[in-house]
Image: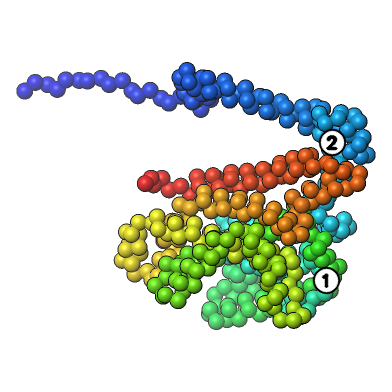
Amino acid sequence: MSEPELVFRPKPARPAPAGTLGVIGWVRHNLFSSPANVLLTVLGAYAAYVVVSAVLDWAVFNAVWEADSRRECLDMVGRSGACWPGVAAWFWNLIYGLYPKDEVWRINLGFLVLVAWVVPLWLERVRSKVAIGLSAVLVYPFLASYFFLGGEKGLIWSLLIAFSLLTFVWVLATSVVERRTGRTLAETLLARVGAADADPAHQRRVLLWSALAALVVAYAVVWLWRLPETPTNDWGGLFLTLVISGIGITFSLPAGVLLALGRRCDLPVISVFCTVFIELFRSVPLITILFMFTTMLPLFLPVGVEVDLLVRAIVAVCLFASAYMAEIVRGGLQAIPRGQYEAAAAMGLGYWRSTALIIMPQALKIMIPTIVGQFIGLFKDTTLVSIIGLFDLLNMARAVGEDTRWLGLFIEPFFFVTLLYFVFCFAMSQYSISLERKLDTGHRR
């Protein structure tokens, strides 16, 4: 028997490092791999150079930065450069609308509270992220509404604001405690009062009485807290755009999930209702729905009952976005293989548990790009509320050119608004990409 031959195989070449050589290789492979690619790269670079240089010349190098009127800007550079003093003079209106300047701190504080509310969702070792996320969606609007609107408070409204304020304190305390100790706030509180080893009934009583005492303190604070009323007619600019789109985005996802599940339901009444709702709102343009809610909704209300114009616009946007989101979610549910349903049934899970724990997470993960695309579209579609008389960001930019000092100044405000929309939409797009990478499990279809 002959001895086996020794075969020496060279080691596979290591991939190029992600440094200069890697970048050069990527550029060569993607931009200069063939004569056609070289030609397209050169033409694209030249077109980009022409466009960018023209924009920079108009917006920066030939622009006017100090002037008292548009006439003065035209006397300086004519129409070859931008007139930014008009945008600077209307900057606060573009951001806050006609909101009183001495009350703008309320808007800033309201958004800072929102940021502090949702930051724990990205912190490690915070275990109560689901509860924190739900509280941001369901409870924060009560606190924000009083920040932004103000005015007199009744008993029920004061209780809701006190509850939201207490919830915010709970979110902050929970985040700090769970990051430092790894235990929940309830476990830490029970340990402090010596009830960690007590029976569950006694522990529930301790937690209940502690929550009631904290709610009483929060109610006393809210009762003494007075903010002057700022009617929604003064709301406008970027602030109004964020309010409408934020409420629409927040409402549309859970409502779309329920509508999608209802459309796939075996009960004919629920399925028909959800199907009719989805098809009705998907078959009508948003501007038509806005006109319907603005002009016809008051006709169906009792005499003397009036609904704020902003509320009508928000309701219309929420219903419209929910119908589109329902079809997106339904597409994600249909993309789940049948074996996932059978595996959930084999584990003994019922419909709701299998949907919440197995089916829906996979469907939402698949549809992340489409869902975020819908959010971006909704954020831009809020410009349609300018048709019904709300001074959102677009309408406020149009108002700059109607000012007597800056009469005819439209390009610069619209250019500034375009940059704002780009920043927000690009941020949502990049977050979508990072979320896809984070949730990627390595499975490929």
Q: Is residue 437 left or right of residue 399?
A: left
**Label 2 packing within 10 angstroms: few (<14), some (14-19), many (20+):** many
Q: Nearest the camera: 318 or 154?
A: 318
Q: Amino acid at mark 2?
A: Cys
View extreme (left): residue: 1
User: Mark 1 to mark 2: distance in Å?
Assistant: 39 Å
View extreme (top): residue: 35
Q: How is the image coloured?
A: rainbow
Q: Quadrant of residue 159?
A: bottom right
Q: Position of residue 374 (x, y in %)?
A: 56, 53
Q: Amino acid at mark 1?
A: Gly
- Helix, strand or loop at mark 2: loop
Q: Name the residue that disc number 2 marks.
A: 83
Q: Residue at x 60, y 23 (%)?
A: 45
**Residue 47, labelled with which disc?**
none
- Quadrant location, the N terminus: top left
Q: Quadrant of residue 292?
A: bottom right
Q: Position of residue 320 (x, y in %)?
A: 59, 62
Q: Quadrant of residue 330?
A: bottom left
Can I make out residue 88 in this image? Answer: no
Q: Residue at x 42, y 59 (%)?
A: 333
Q: Position of residue 433 (x, y in %)?
A: 54, 44
Q: Position of residue 10 (x, y in %)?
A: 31, 20
Q: Is residue 386 above or below residue 316?
A: above
Q: Is residue 213 above or below residue 422?
A: below
**Residue 151, labelled with which disc?**
1
